[in-house]
Amino acid sequence: MSEEIFISTESVDADIRTDFYRSLFSSFLDITPVDQNPLSGSIHIRSVDHWTMTHWKFGLQHCHRRPNLILQADIDAYLLILITKGYFNSTTKNTSTLLNVGDLILINTSQVNSSISAGESMSLYIPRTELEQHMGHYRIPNEVILKAKQPMTQLLTDYMLSLFNVALDLKPRESNPAFEALLSLLAVRLRNGKMPIHQEVNTVLKWRIQQYIDLNIKSPDLGIEKLMSRFNVSRAHLYRAFEAEGGIATFIRNKRLDRIYCELIDQDFSTSVLTEISQAYGFNNSSQFLRAFRLRFGMSPMEVQGHYLDQEPDQLDLKPYFIMQRP
């Protein structure tokens, strides 16, 4: 099954273009103007089976992937972005990287990220499981920059542009191998010069630990010492296994905060309810809990409830602006 959609702010009145543009991406991306410049642009989407590619044209804008959006969207994937015009300044964990035309960036969509950009880009949505199959026993970084002048980057660039152009014309038996070939090229580049994951960091064991954490997330005994004893592993082993998540203690804390966030959405807000929920997940110090919550989601528990209580149905009917759609 293939589908093509084109949406542009040129199809709406000038006075609502910024709100319209933001609404297009609001479920997974918070876009704000830079220096009060109005937002505008267009997005051309081509989907074939479970593969999705986009050609995005945009003016100067500031994009944010915040923890609350990551939790709400629940997207477990990577995004491969090719800069085709302008620039893209990405910031992850206080590290800023400037990308120019021809550069590629691979972003883990489950990680907090922000960017300032203007121009055009080509993107491929890659489910995590698909990329993991191609990477084998090699670790997938949360963010990778591939510079334009590198031979493999040029090969990936040419392939992405060509694939977008012909994606809808491929026969059903051709489309999946065509996208798989792109992932094979990407995996070769990502593995270049990298060593396999250390033998101690056993992915099956990590999965078992994650399952145990989920089942015992409210237990006051859940912590590093408990996990070391339960799975007979060292503190260093636990840190290496969860290094990408900021360490095992951070992983547990964020899991608990995510559960609290979900429960707050489903209940009427009151100080007593908040205290009861936070203490059930091991946060006995209210000031420490509020600080950790704001650090994770960028807002207080009261603001989270207010956001959902005040949220009205979308006033913008997007269907008339789907200028082109081909089933």
Image (cartoon, helix red, strand yellow):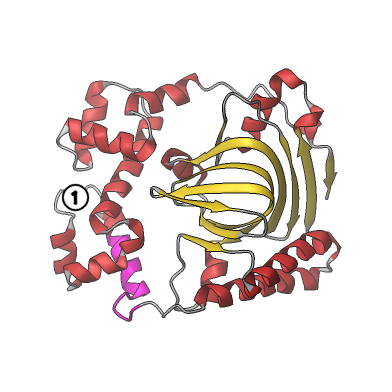
Q: Is residue 150 magenta?
A: no
Task: Report x, y in % for residue 266.
Answer: 40, 31
SS category of the residue bearing label 1: loop
The residue located at (69%, 56%) in the rendering is 52
Task: Report x, y in % for residue 10.
Answer: 80, 30
The kind of residue on which mark 1 rests is Ser
Task: Report x, y in % for residue 221.
Answer: 14, 53
The residue located at (27%, 38%) in the rendering is 292
Relative to 82, 290 lies left or right? left
Q: Is residue 209 magenta?
A: yes
The residue located at (38%, 77%) in the rendering is 197
The residue located at (17%, 71%) in the rendering is 234
Provide the residue designation for mark 1: 219
| Residue 23 is at least partly visible in this image | yes
Q: Above or below — where is 322 with respect to 188?
A: above
Q: Nearer the viewer, residue 155 or 276?
A: 155
Relative to 185, 287 lies left or right? left
What range of the chain is rendered magenta? 198-212
